[in-house]
Image (tube, helix red, strand yellow):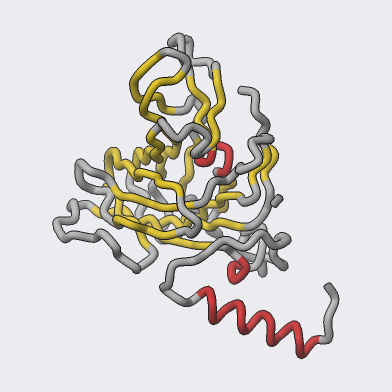
Amino acid sequence: MKLTAPLSLGVFALTAASIVACSNETTGPSRTARGAAAFDTGLPGNPSTALYKFNMIGVSNPKDADLTGDNGKRMFVNLDGHSTINLVEGDDFDILDANATDKDGGKFQLPDPDPDNDGTTWYGVYVRTLGKPGGSANLTSCVTGTVDGSTGTFCSVDTIKVERKSGKPAVYNVSKELLTTCVDLDGDQICDKRIFLFDDSLLDYAWSVDNNGLRNAQFYFFPIPQTIGLNP
């Protein structure tokens, strides 16, 4: 699924990793071990060891410009209200449409997190809230299509609230909420079936962002396996 070297070699490796992390090119996944120390960022590893990172930026005015194929590693969402980030499977992490403020939503490409279908992902997703204290957002995942005979759009009963509190920026592990959708099929608000991202090729996948004034959040993807399980 998805060290101890001389000091000079370690410094060289860290410097090289930092240079790669600063590139705006599409980032391909590497199923390596978890990263080094988090250096007081609150993250589970050195930021330079992340597979990919992008900034989610809340804006008060919807974007009019065409942001498809944008390489800025950021996703614009509505500062107050709902935004959709559509998800597509690919070998690399890449933002295909950076504008999630319009009716079509944004588009983000990422690899299948659980290709072995065993309930353990080979990478995890972490959100770090930044900027002036204040603001929060509810994040969850949704699928559209037919699930066990029922057709429609189903958003997960697993929702996580991320917020910018006072003090150091908080870090949230959002892997379960964003890499799986726990579907309620009978309307009792209890999960009946857990669907991992890209498990069913006939479904469309998306992230739902309900923002309440959160202006900036960093999304990190680390090669850290997450044992979520196949059951609800």
In the foreground, 27 or 142: 27
State the residue at coordinates (18%, 55%).
Answer: 63
Q: Position of residue 221 (x, y in %)?
A: 55, 56
Residue drawn 41% across the image and 73% down it: 24
In this view, 52 is above or below 24 = above
Which residue is outermost to the bottom?
Answer: 8
State whether residue 115 is above or below residue 191: below
Percent position of residue 59, x then y: 26, 54
The answer to whether residue 129 is above or below residue 21 is above
Extreme-left residue of the structure: 64
Left or right: 28 in relation to 56: right
Question: Where the C terminus falls, by quadrant?
Answer: top right
Residue 222 visible from this viewpoint: yes
- Can you give x and y, in whole percent of width and height, for residue 29 in the image? 57, 61
- Residue 175 point in image, percent of width and height: 57, 43
Front residue (pair 210, 50): 50
